[in-house]
Image (cartoon, rainbow, N blue to C red):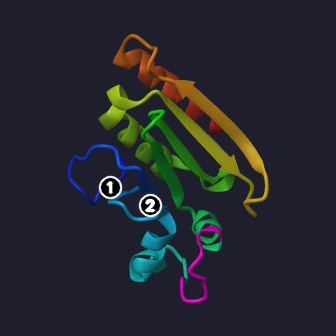
Amino acid sequence: MAAFPEKNYGLRSKMWILPNGAVVGLDGEWHYRWILAHKNRVAEFGLDTTTLPDEEGPVRIAALKRGFFRVSYETRSSNLIFEGLENKFEKGITDGIFMIVMENMNALNEIKVTLFNEDVTEIKSNRSAPLFTLPTADAKLAAVEDVVGKLS
């Protein structure tokens, strides 16, 4: 299972799944600002932030290329969105996805997983699953397994 640095928590509008599968919830912080603010922690995964501009696009792409998965929760639609690289979609990442979904299953309308090529220039896989309309936790979990299984 993925390592979670924080105790049980609810959905955050922004989260990262680190390359080792750990989930980090961002409290009101932009994804790219968290990366830039935690240079020592992200350096553990080979992400050098010293040459990155203080801009969302370049930081996002650099993080995705190093195996970070960006997680966004859209509060209005209750959709949970995961994005990362197809060649970095491994067990630790899928464990992180399942843990986030399992902790928050009843609050989710839909999950979406988008995987890019290694240059983050092309979508290689894009799958989603509606959860809100499914009657049981088992049915919801099966839908998530279907999405994640077809991507890996």
Q: At which x and y percent is residue 149?
A: 58, 32
Q: What element carries label 1?
A: loop
**Horizontal relation, residue 117 to residue 149: left or right:** right
Residue drawn at point x = 60 percent, y = 75 percent: 55
Identify the magenta region. Answer: 49-57
Q: How many marks?
A: 2
Q: Position of residue 11 (x, y in %)?
A: 34, 44
Q: Which residue is drawn at 65% across and 73% down?
A: 58
Q: Mark 2 points at which residue?
A: 20
| Residue 87 left/right relative to 45 | right
Residue at 36 percent of width and 47 percent of height: 1
Locate residue 6, reporting x and y percent: 24, 57
Q: Say which of 116 and 79 sits in front.
A: 79
Q: Is residue 131 magenta?
A: no
Relative to 18, say whether 11 is above or below. above
Per the image, is 50 magenta?
A: yes
Q: Say which residue label 1 marks.
A: 3
Disc 2 residue type (three-letter): Asn
